[in-house]
Image (cartoon, rainbow, N blue to C red):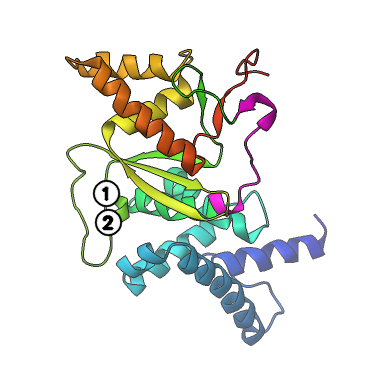
């Protein structure tokens, strides 16, 4: 590298981690301090706005230690500010060394808070060329909107706040559905196990119809009256269709790959 490039790398390394990387020679510390504060404050402020519940749960020392470590260690793959929360999640999951005083739900809460931003910025849309919006939800193959995300957490993340900090996972998973509606509003729904299972089948299985999916659920439940499960599922499918979570059924002749 040229001398100028080496100077740039020293400059950036010092801004990222002033404790471990000395400032480049010949630069007045008063001037470097401006850059140190400007860069860090931009990152810290954006993270605080993106993860407001997590910020309220961590005291100042813990929060700033977390953001300092992220800023020093993580190498982002994009310069775009809206993508920074996704980069932070990657750091939490793959790069950060857990600390003894971490809330056990730290990553799950951060993921839950990130989802709203991610869905609001998503450019995906239902592929109407392969969807029948008036299709029969029991006889046809229901399709899940790409703007509807079924989620599962070990902790009840939607309830966590300053007055509720669980130290153990729930007895069963917390199932949530987050979706963006036709007015581009983000809605969060808590799901019961049957609805969560139905959405999982819609999203991942190749069963031929909504009715076949509900029959499978009735079998898994060992329900004595499968017709009751199918009728309840029909109501769930209709409600999800009205919300836009299920935009319709697969058009005849369409396969998952076309």
The quarter of the picture where residue 133 lies is: top right
Q: Name the residue under label 1.
A: 156
Crowding at mark 1 (Cα within 10 Å: few <14, some 14-19, many 20+): many
State left or right for residue 3 relative to residue 214. Answer: right
Crowding at mark 2 (Cα within 10 Å: few <14, some 14-19, many 20+): few
The local secondary structure at tag 2 comes to helix
Q: Is residue 97 visible?
A: no
Question: Which residue is at a point 53% across and 61% down the rendered structure image?
Answer: 71
| Label pair 2/1, CB-CB below 8 angstroms | yes
Q: Mark 2 points at which residue?
A: 159
- Is 199 located above or below residue 41 in the figure? above
Using the image, tell me which numbered label, if any, was put on residue 123. none
State left or right for residue 2 relative to residue 23. Answer: right
Q: Which of 235 and 70 is in front in this view?
A: 235
- Is 163 located above or below residue 256 in the figure? below
**Percent from the top left, x then y, of residue 172?**
21, 36
Q: Which of 52 and 239 is in front in this view?
A: 239
Q: Can residue 143 be seen in this view?
A: yes
Q: Which of 201 and 110 is in front in this view?
A: 201
The segment highlighted magenta reads 119-132
State left or right for residue 182 relative to residue 89. Answer: right
Q: Is residue 238 magenta?
A: no
- Is 36 located above or below residue 217 in the figure? below
- Find the distance from the CA under tag 2 to the CA under tag 1: 6 Å
- Is 203 located above or below residue 98 in the figure? above
Question: Which residue is at a point 20% across and 16% down the rendered structure image?
Answer: 225
Q: Work out which residue is located at the far bottom of the displayed protein and give it.
A: 30
The quarter of the picture where residue 40 lies is: bottom right
**Percent from the top left, x then y, of residue 47?**
49, 65
């Amino acid at each position: 590298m040229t001398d100028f490039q080496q100077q740039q790398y020293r400059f950036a390394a010092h801004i990222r981690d002033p404790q471990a990387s000395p400032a480049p020679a010949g630069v007045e510390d008063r001037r470097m301090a401006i850059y140190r504060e400007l860069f860090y404050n931009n990152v810290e402020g954006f993270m605080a706005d993106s993860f407001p519940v997590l910020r309220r749960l961590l005291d100042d020392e813990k929060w700033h230690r977390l953001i300092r470590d992220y800023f020093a260690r993580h190498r982002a793959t994009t310069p775009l500010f809206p993508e920074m929360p996704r980069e932070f999640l990657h750091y939490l999951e793959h790069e950060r060394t857990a600390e003894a005083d971490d809330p056990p739900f730290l990553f799950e809460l951060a993921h839950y808070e990130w989802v709203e931003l991610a869905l609001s910025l998503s450019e995906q849309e239902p592929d109407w060329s392969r969807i029948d919006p008036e299709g029969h939800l029991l006889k046809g193959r229901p399709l899940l909107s790409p703007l509807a995300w079924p989620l599962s957490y070990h902790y009840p993340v939607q309830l966590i706040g300053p007055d509720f900090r669980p130290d153990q996972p729930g007895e069963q998973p917390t199932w949530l559905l987050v979706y963006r509606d036709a007015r581009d509003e983000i809605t969060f729904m808590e799901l019961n196990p049957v609805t969560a299972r139905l959405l999982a089948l819609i999203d991942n299985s190749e069963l031929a119809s909504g009715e076949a999916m509900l029959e499978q659920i009735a079998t898994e439940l060992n329900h004595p009256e499968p017709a009751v499960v199918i009728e309840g599922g029909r109501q769930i499918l209709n409600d999800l269709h009205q919300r836009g979570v299920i935009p319709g059924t697969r058009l005849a002749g369409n396969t998952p790959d076309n």
